[in-house]
Amino acid sequence: MPSPLLRSPLLWFSAAFFAALAWSAVHPADSFTWWLEVFPALLGYAVLIAVARRWQFTTFVLVVILLHMLVLMVGGHYTYAGVPGFRFNLSWLGGDRNDYDKLGHFFQGFAPALVAREVLSRKQIVRTRGWMNFLVVALCLGISAAYELVEWAVSVATGSGGDAFLGTQGYLWDTQSDMLFALIGATVAVLAFGRLQDGILRRSFPDMTGIKPSQRT
């Protein structure tokens, strides 16, 4: 029978994380952009390891976090404007451009929303579904706005060196559309996956007195 260590979700998470990181780091399109794009994934992994002894996320949330990190690593390897297969001619997203960055910003709302829901539920900070959804979406919008400020600061500090990191590709409303996709991601997370996550939490932590199926507002 496998040892508890081999059954640990964080072990398999780490194996997948470092395999993807190694692939991403081999001959990236732009080394400076690679560091900028991959740094949030490295920071997130460091936080997971730092809190692992006192807090372990469910496998469901770990998979979501890993998917978000993979999106960051792919974007870092190619740059967001160079990822194959994401060039579309959509007028409302700036015309003929690579829209991989919109997938990245969708996950910027989607993954933090499910992380926040798990923390708030297990800490029993919010007990009603309506307030949970509102606070989680608001939090994700705040994260998205903060990230846009970071992008602005990098652009000001590095000049043209930060252009690939911004990924605007000349689109005037790139910042606003980035936040819109983060909002969409957070909304999809709470509305389409909220009940699934609540069920997983109740099965994983039977003594948890968080949101009950009947608590809708």
Image (tube, rainbow, N blue to C red):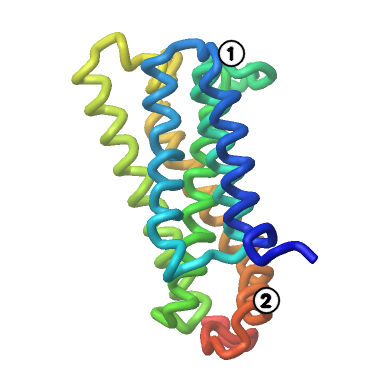
Residue 32's place in the image compared with 140, above or below, is above
Rendering quarter of residue 16 = top right
Three-letter code, disc 2: Gly
Is residue 84 visible in the rendered structure shown here? yes
Residue at the outermost left position: 157
Is 188 left or right of 167, judged from the image as shown?
right
Rendering quarter of residue 167 = top left
Is 129 left or right of 89, judged from the image as shown?
left
At mark 1, the secondary structure is strand
Question: Which of 111/19 is in front?
Answer: 19
Residue 201: image x %, image y %? 61, 75
Residue 5's place in the image compared with 29, above or below, is below
Residue 146: image x %, image y %? 30, 43
At mark 2, the secondary structure is helix
Q: Which residue is mark 1?
A: 96
Three-letter code, disc 1: Asp
How far is mark 1 from mark 2, CA to CA? 42 Å
Crowd tier of the residue under label 2, counting other residues whose Cα lies within 10 Å: few below 14, some 14–19, many 20 or above? some
Report the residue at 44% width, 75% height from top.
131
Q: Which residue is mark 2?
A: 199
Residue 180: image x %, image y %? 47, 42
Question: Which of 121/167 is in front?
Answer: 121
| Quadrant for the N terminus in the image | bottom right
Of the image marks 1 and 2, the number of the one nearer the N terminus: 1
Crowd tier of the residue under label 1, counting other residues whose Cα lies within 10 Å: few below 14, some 14–19, many 20 or above? few
Report the residue at 44% width, 12% height from top.
30
